[in-house]
Amino acid sequence: MGGLLFGARLTGPGISLIDATYDYGFRCLHGLLPPNTTGGFPDDFYSSGYNAAQGSAGLASQDHRDQGILGYEFMIQNSQSGPMSWWESSTAPSPTTPWVGRHPSAGQGSSPHAWGIAGANKVLLDSLVAERSDGELIVGRGVPDSWLGHDGPLTVTNFPTIDGGRLSLAISSSDRSVSLSFRGRLPDRPVKFQLPAFVRNVEEVSTGAVDQSTGTVALGPGTRKVTVELRRPPGPG
């Protein structure tokens, strides 16, 4: 994702084999660990504080763009060692924990593990909205289909942009309709609205140009709202 944001030319196996690498890794873990954990380190193999951050490369992929958020959801649901806190590496949840929810039996490294938490928060934000070095905004690239169609919008507030600007955005959806709106100081740059649910699934847009293969709705500078009608409802994610 970093190379994409800085306008680097992305070629070679590090890009072309991202999907194959995730597919192979998760296939090897099938039956050994639950979905959306990449495992841990000896001898606490269940998960790690880097689980969400290890989905970052998925933002540059075709089929695993939501892996960062899916990995973060797994951490929240299964491996917190304290409120929004994680060991560097952890065991499976204890069946006898006095806490509400699922929490590791043991862990290693530091807890809270700041490096892992920083990586998780970064991939979460990059999945929702990121800004290229030229000021172009990329919105929604890693949002899972399962986050769409619920009550209330997905929102990001007070997002910093070039030249000291700040903006807020909201993604609202229902059935086959998805809308993006902005408030605040919008940079005079293009916006790419790139939900994975858009890939080969856009019926029509209220404004902008559509690339079906990448699921991109390209908006001109200054556009503050767009509504995207889908051919079929998003999948369960």
Image: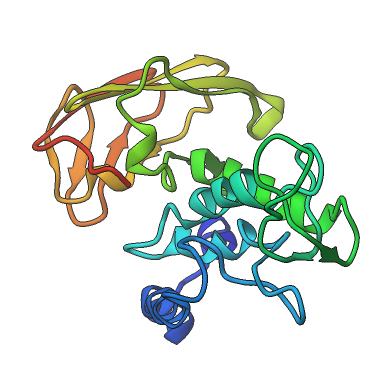
**Rendering coords of residue 191 (x, y %):** 40, 36
On-image quarter of the N terminus:
bottom right
Farthest bottom residue? Answer: 13
Q: How many marks?
A: 0
Q: Quadrant of residue 205?
A: top left
Q: Is residue 149 rendered to the left or right of residue 51?
A: left
Q: Is residue 25 rendered to the left or right of residue 212?
A: right
Q: Which residue is drawn at 15% across and 50% down?
A: 200
Farthest right residue? Answer: 110
Q: Residue at x 18, y 22 (%)?
A: 206
Q: Quadrant of residue 167?
A: top right
**Rendering coords of residue 85 (x, y %):** 79, 45
Q: Is residue 172 rendered to the left or right of residue 178?
A: right
**Rendering coords of residue 127 (x, y %):** 51, 45
Q: Residue at x 66, y 62 (%)?
A: 92
Answer above or below: position of 196 versus 51: above
User: Quick one: 70 or 81, which is closer to the camera?
Assistant: 81
Q: Which residue is drawn at 39% across and 65% down?
A: 61
Answer above or below: position of 42 versus 229: below
Answer above or below: position of 162 versus 38: above
User: Quick one: 157 or 71, which is closer to the camera?
Assistant: 71
The reply to whether residue 194 is visible in this rendering is: no
**Rendering coords of residue 229 (x, y %):** 15, 28
